Amino acid sequence: MIGLMVGICLAAQPAVCVTRLLPGPCVEAEAPARAAAWAAARPGLVVGDTRCAPFGPAVLPVTEVAPGVFVHQGRHELPGPENAADQANIGFVLGEDAVAVIDAGGSRTVGEGLYAAIRARTDLPIRWLILTHMHPDHTLGASVFAEAGATVIGHARLPAALAARADSYAATLLREAGPAFAIGSEPVPPAETVEGTRRLDLGGRVLRLEAHPTAHTDNDLSVVDEATGAWFAGDLVFAGHLPTIDGSVLGWLALLDELAGREVAFAVPGHGPPRLPWPGGAAPMRAYLEGLVAETRAAIARGESLGEAVRRLGTGLRGDWALFDAFNARNATAAYRELEWE
């Protein structure tokens, strides 16, 4: 696998340099100009050496969860330089004519690794990048696939959600993972959006995209591969990693009720194992959300303030959840603010 490998440094911190993969065919005579154009669109970067060479990024490990359906399992960790913000489950589906990518990872490094995993298996064009929602662990590797020619598609409310958060996502990645991983890590606004449902034909297999009402976020989108019944649920489904509320806990529970009857072969959760039984695999997540709602309603009925309640809401629901201490208080705050107006 040959690609355009480009050395990039920060103008303000010349010691901070990385090698980036620019996807697509590599022509030596065109490489310097192509690299310069890429850097010019990102002020503050300086181009070093350019070369057509075997892919530098490590190929992300993926599991073939069904024929032609591949998933990379993210880590249950907070983002940092040791993990390149590789937190979310992301994947791709191979058709006879094209490839669709589902989520892009939490940094350019992760996106490049997924691109390398695709190119290790096929030379077919990457036609679509489907974003399941706006969170940075799913979107900050998006530019790799946009540069490879993919059309970015997401929920109708995704453009506004990304626009409102892009600066804070960039600042958070810079702070938590460091400047090297921040270089080139950026969300890409969708060129096309979905209200209701839409089907994408990859040749010999069709993906069905569905935009959902407010649940985990206000811009959740899921993807079913009609050929195998594999359902990429995004962060509508968590397993092992504590679910995080950035939308409506009541809306999420209502949507889980509706989705429980869906006839799919299995779910690919946004966090957890690459393949999860459906709907049984969502039972622990549901129990946590229901328990948090019950505790919050009781605290409100007792007249507890937000500050008083958040210190203890959900603490009895710790179980085996990864990152419980990082996210439970945030969930309790979101639940209280929603339920106090019932």
Image (cartoon, rainbow, N blue to C red):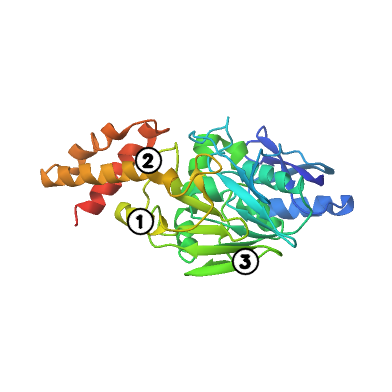
Please state the total of marks drawn on the protein image: 3
Residue at x-position 85% and y-position 54%: 30
Which residue is denoted by mark 1 in the rendering?
257
Separation of marks 1 and 2 at Cα, in angstroms:
14 Å
Q: In the picture provided, is 7 more to the left or to the right than 314?
A: right
Query: Which numbered disc covers residue 200?
Result: 3
Q: Position of residue 87 (x, y in %)?
A: 53, 39
The amino acid beneath tag 2 is: Pro
Mark 1 falls on what kind of element? helix
Mark 2 falls on what kind of element? helix
Separation of marks 2 and 3 at Cα, in angstroms:
32 Å
Residue at x-position 35% and y-position 56%: 257
**Front one among 107 and 17:** 107
Mark 3 falls on what kind of element? strand
Counting residues from the start of the chain, the first of labels 1 and 3 encountered is 3
Residue at x-position 49% and y-position 34%: 76
**The C terminus: image quadrant:** bottom left
Q: In the picture provided, is 283 more to the left or to the right than 115?
A: left
Q: Does residue 65 appear in this view?
A: yes
Q: Position of residue 209 (x, y in %)?
A: 54, 63
Residue 50's place in the image compared with 219, above or below, is above
**Front one among 284 and 47:** 284
Query: Which numbered disc covers residue 284?
Result: 2
The amino acid beneath tag 3 is: Leu
Say few, some or many: other residues with alpha carbon within 10 Å of mark 1 (under 14 / 14 to 19 / 20 or more).
few
